[in-house]
Image: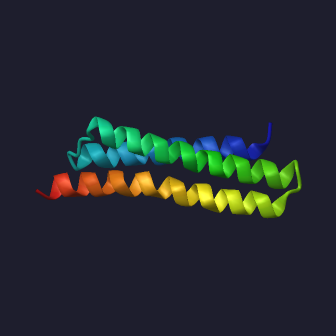
Amino acid sequence: MDAIYFFLTIALAVGLTMLFTWFKKNNITLKWNEWVLGILGLLLALFAIQHTYASATYEFEYTSAWIVGVIVLLLAVVPLLFAARSVRRRVDK
């Protein structure tokens, strides 16, 4: 197993812990649809990272790795932005 997956897991765990701590400190709750959008965005981002790394490292297909990686990462940003906008709109009321 490559070390990148270990470091990616550590970074993900630390990032999510910091995010949930910030939510708790600022008394922010998430609705079910915001959870779904956040998880979908996170899974798409992880898929893009894994696909780009595997395609470039094992298959030596650099062009397709970067093209698919960028497209899927852009698609991952969309549900994350919708979830963030929904939370921001509800919290600002």
Q: Out of 54 and 14, give the one closest to the viewer.
A: 54
Q: Which residue is located at x 66 percent, y 51 percent?
A: 49
Q: Is residue 78 left or right of residue 88?
A: right
Q: Which residue is located at x 20 percent, y 57 percent?
A: 89
Q: How is the image coloured?
A: rainbow
Q: Which residue is located at x 80 percent, y 51 percent?
A: 55
Q: Out of 48 and 2, give the one closest to the viewer.
A: 48
Q: Is residue 26 left or right of residue 6?
A: left
Residue 90 in the image: above or below residue 32? below
Q: Out of 13 and 48, give the one closest to the viewer.
A: 48
Q: Which residue is located at x 26 percent, y 51 percent?
A: 87
Image quadrant in which the C terminus is located? bottom left
Image quadrant in which the N terminus is located? top right
Q: Is residue 72 left or right of residue 77?
A: right
Residue 68 in the image: above or below residue 29? below
Q: Position of residue 72 (x, y in %)?
A: 60, 55
Res 81 quadrant in image: bottom left
Question: Which residue is farthest left?
Answer: 93
Q: Position of residue 82 (x, y in %)?
A: 35, 54
Q: Position of residue 85 (x, y in %)?
A: 29, 58
Q: How many marks?
A: 0
